[in-house]
Image (cartoon, helix red, strand yellow):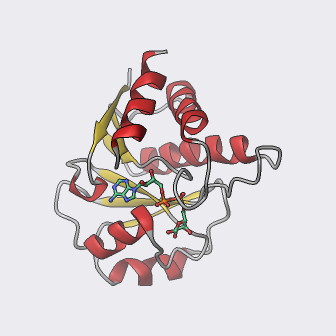
Amino acid sequence: MVAIEAVRGDITEEHVDAVVTAANESLLGGGGVDGAVHRAAGPRLAQAGSAIGPCPPGDAMATPSFDLDPPVRHIVHTVGPVWEGGDQGEAEILASCYRHSLQVADELDVRSIAFPAIATGVHGFPADQAARIAVTTLRSTPTRIEQIRLVAFDHDTYEILAVALRR
Ligand code: APR
């Protein structure tokens, strides 16, 4: 069974096979976690993103990890929903991000993966609801992945993820 844990830190420093980034549809790079991932992976990441993008909300696409240090081999780009109050299918799109990211990683034979708190920054998704969706979706999606790390950049997000994992 997959082990899911919450950790606090910078996702670009995770020792996992694949790192997920909360991208925009262009896959050319942005701010927040996506900016950090693109800075760490180098300019070839945007080139690779432009070659496979655009990526619609709720979907996920993989590229190599370029300049990120091993063991990271893959970057999974997923596009979260923009929060518009909750009645525009945001929850379903966010669940789809986690589900598709796992599916893409499975196809690449990934054994360990790190997720940021998708959509909870610039996109404005409430962090507690997002954490519940993340945990529920990851637990219910069949996968060969053995280790999932939910990486919180700040203390509040870490606490929220820890609570969601204890449910
Ligand atoms: N490591 C881990 N988490 C991080 C990091 C990092 N280095 N940097 C930021 N975060 C956290 C934020 O604190 C937030 O909890 O990632 C979470 C998601 O925030 P955003 O990066 O703003 O992502 P999102 O809300 O999905 O918005 C995506 O922002 O920059 C653009 O290109 C991106 O358009 C897309 C949008």
Say if 78 sits above or below 137 in the image.
Answer: below
Q: In the displayed structure, does residue 43 sit left or right of residue 91?
A: left
The percent coordinates of residue 14 (x first, y second) are: 23, 50
The percent coordinates of residue 8 (x first, y second) are: 28, 41
Q: Is residue 111 visible?
A: no
The quadrant in which the N terminus is found is top left
Res 40 quadrant in image:
bottom left
Q: Is residue 70 visible?
A: yes
Res 35 quadrant in image:
bottom left
The extreme top residue here reads: 167
The number of numbered badges drawn on the structure is 0
Q: In the displayed structure, does residue 49 sit left or right of residue 150?
A: right
Q: Which residue appears at 58% of the width and 48% of the height?
A: 97
Foreground residue, 10 or 49? Answer: 10
Res 2 quadrant in image:
top left
Say if 136 sits above or below 12 in the image.
Answer: above
Foreground residue, 138 or 91? Answer: 91
Q: In the displayed structure, does residue 49 sit left or right of residue 38?
A: right
The percent coordinates of residue 127 (x first, y second) are: 54, 41
Q: Which residue appears at 57% of the width and 32% of the height?
A: 137
